[in-house]
Structures are given as structure tokens and as C-alpha cells.
Image: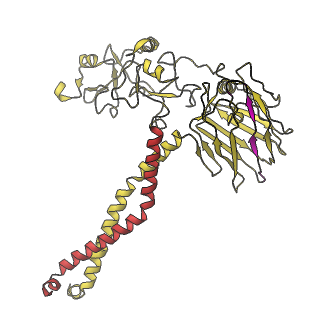
Chain colours: A red, B yellow
Amino acid sequence: MTWLVIHLWLWCLLAFVVGALVAWFVVRALYRPIREVSADLSADLKERVA
Amino acid sequence: MTWVAGHSWVLLLLSALAGFAFTWWWMVRKIRGRVPITKEVAAVAASSGAAGTSAAGAGVAAGAATLAGGAVAPELEMAQAPDGDAAIVNVAAPAADLDVDVDVPEADVDLPNADVPDVALPDVEAAVPAVDLDVPEAAVHLAGDETDADLSVSDVDAGAGSAATAAVPLVGTGVDGESDSAAELDAEAEGGSAAVDSDAAAEADIELGGTPEAEAMADPEAAFDGKPETAAAAAGLLGGTAAASYAVGSFGEGSVDPLPDGSMPVGFDVKGNADSMLYHSPESPWYARTKAEVWFRDEESAAAAGFARWDSRGRGTRGSAGAGGDAATLAAPSYAVGSFGEGSVDPLPDGSMPVGFDVKGNADSMLYHSPKSPWYARTKAEVWFRDEATAAAAGFKHWDPAKR
């Protein structure tokens, strides 16, 4: 454990990863409507073209 | 530095923030790259749809509304917007097995100062062989404060065979409805406009012309604005036998050159791209984006002129197929000999490709690009050649180094 405390850079890396994961979840949730609408439109277009 | 080392939580917080910010930027950038595609898909879907709606006092995009045989009672619903604008929000028409095409490229109906309590279109009997409505776009605007319009099309009975109505009465036909204030319906179709005054008693006359069987009560007050193109458009709208006539286009019979206003000639709904030699029927996903350099009556006419279908692998070549191709060749205009001798043509003022000269020459690089070249579309032709041999004879080299 002392080794980890001494190696602060490892904690920084871990914090970076945690921040990245949080951002990933947030953006994914925020942009979900766009993806759904896009998918609906694509399916609709395929039906019309077919 | 010592302070930072002593406050490791600051470093940890900064690291987390950096990770958050970087991931946010990366993901948003990735997603936003898809948004234009979404818009594009929406545009294509709207343009090719059977009936699109717009509730915001504006437009109706109706792709291909085909009316059925037998008695047809189409529904025309008006939506009241808070600002006095009204829009047709639903144009419903049963499916059809009819033959006559009525194309309404664009209709814009304005009712200035409209205080229109009711516009009722009573029963109309008409025997029409067949009507196929194509209403790409229609917009109805009711300007004014007290707008309470109820525009309805009631029963339309047809004789044996078929009958049809729908948005047609708004364009090119006489619509005479009751209105407290002078309501003027301007219907634009095919570059022309038909003005219909409605301030008389509630009577509606729907004229479905073009067939001797048609029984229509024409209102003398409902008159077009006198423009010849209006009459032509109306004729094209109302009857298969009275379709508007156009000069034969540069690709022979069945083709029409683009109209000055850019609108679609009535009955010619297939777009031709002279650069790619591809044609796009309305079901093409690129139909809305394609700028028609020539209009064809149908796909057969386009194929006869050497155009290839938009989804085919091979591209068409000018004058390559059948009698239509011969007609295209015969109809090809003549050009002055270009600066690189016989078989070359200097660029035209409008930048279009001279008919029959589809090889682009780049005078800077002294390379020529046939339509097979991957750089063909991007190359600005400083000279056009009839074929690759002519270009080579003029000192130009093949775009592909392996074939020089």
C-alpha cells in the first residue's frame, strides 16, 4: 500500500480512467435520443427505398 | 511544486477532470459526425415519402399520392396555428390503380386577410379515367387574425372506371368558396400561378378536365391569371390528354431540358445527370439532391438515351442504346472546334459538358480524365474531348500512369 501511495502517478492514472468512464456514461445517456431517431429514420428510409 | 506534491488530491482531481474532458470531447465529436447523416436521411425520407406533414403553418410534402379507382372521398384536414397560419396536415388518399398522372411540383396557397368561416366544396360528379397525384410539396398559408377556415372536399362521385380528387382542387381548378373577406388562393404550379378568387356564396366548382365525360361546373369568376404557363400547368394537372407540351430535349424524344425556373416539367419526373450519365427516378435516395440536367418522361426514355439507372453498376454512355441513343446523337448540338484541334471543345459558358464530349482535359497537368477516372468529378475541364484517342492525339496523357 505504501508503494501505491508513493507512486502518485498511478493514482492519477486511475483518476483519469474514472473521469473518462464517467464522461462516457454521461455522453452516452445524453445522446441516446439522437441515436434512436437516426436508427428510426434509417429503417424508415430503407423501407421506402425497398 | 512542493505544494502540489503535498496536495495529491489536487493532482487526482485534475487527472479525473482531464479524463472526463478528453472522453467528452472524443465522444461528442464522434456523435456529431453522424448528425449531418441524420439530417440527410430525414430530408430524403421527407422528399420520397408518401405524405409528409408539417404542422407549423407551412408545408405539406406529399411524395406520391395515388388515388384509387371508384368513388374517392379524400380527406383534407386543416390545422389551425396560433398565429393565424394554417397548414394542411394530412392529405389522405386511398391507394390506386389509375393511369393518368397529375403532377403538382409545388403549390403555394395564400389566403391574405382571410376570415374564412367555411369553404365547402359540394358534391361533384366527374368521370375521369385515372388520376395519379404527385404532390411533392404544398403549402397553405392563411394570413390574418381571424382565420377559421374549414376547407373540406366532400363526396366526389365518379363514373365507371375511376375518379379522383384530393389536393387537386387547390391547384389549377376552380375553387369558389364562401368568404367574408376576399380570399385569394394562389396556386403555383409549374412556374405559373393560378389565382382563384373566392368571395361568393358557398359553392365549389371542381373541374376535372381533359375528358369529355367530365362533368364540371366551371365558375366564370374563378379564373387563372392569364399566364400561358398556368393554362399549360392546369392542363397538365387535369387531364392526361391535355398534358403540357415541351420542346424535345437534347437527349431526344422523351426528354426535356431543364425549365428556366428549375421546376419539373409535368409528366417528366425522372432526373438525368449528364455528368454521371445516371438517371434518378423518384425512388432514388439521391433524387432530391440530384440537379436535373435533363428530365425524362420515364425510365425507359432515360435508358434509351444512354443513361443508366442510379443503382446500376455500370454507367451509361451517350448515344449508346437503341433508337433513343440515335435520337440523342442526332439532336446533339454542334460546337466550335476547341483550342486543341478537331475533337476538342472549349468549356461552355455554363460549365456544362458538351454533348458527346465527355473526356475532360487538364491543360495544366496535360492529363485527360475519362468518366472512369476516380478524379473525373473533381477535375475541372479546361478542354473537353470526344474520346480518349482524341485527347491522346492532342498530347494529353492518360490519368492512370500505368496506361500512359
Magenta includes B153? yes
Quarter of the rendering containing residue B24: bottom left
Q: How many marks?
A: 0
Quarter of the rendering containing residue B361: top left
Q: Residue furthest right?
A: B201
Magenta includes B51? no
Vertical order, B73 against B31 (above or below)? above
* Lateral position of residue B181 relative to residue B15, left or right: right
Q: Quadrant of the C terminus of chain B?
A: top left
The structure residue drawn at horizontal position 42% and vertical position 24%, both measured from the top left corner, is B348
The structure residue drawn at horizontal position 30% and vertical position 67%, both measured from the top left corner, is B22
Q: Is residue B213 visible?
A: yes
Q: Position of residue B125 (x, y in %)?
A: 77, 29
Q: Position of residue B78 (x, y in %)?
A: 70, 47
The structure residue drawn at horizontal position 36% and vertical position 68%, both measured from the top left corner, is A25
Q: Is residue B40 visible?
A: no
* Lateral position of residue A40 relative to residue B185, left or right: left
Q: Position of residue A35 (x, y in %)?
A: 42, 56
* Lateral position of residue A49 relative to residue B233, left or right: left
Vertical order, B14 against B74 (above or below)? below
Q: Residue furthest left?
A: A3
* Lateral position of residue B137 relative to residue B390, left or right: right
Quarter of the rendering containing residue B236: top right
Q: Position of residue B18 (x, y in %)?
A: 29, 72
The structure residue drawn at horizontal position 23% and vertical position 25%, both measured from the top left corner, is B398
Q: How would you classify the magenta stretch by its main secondary structure?
A: loop
Region rendered in magenta: B146-162
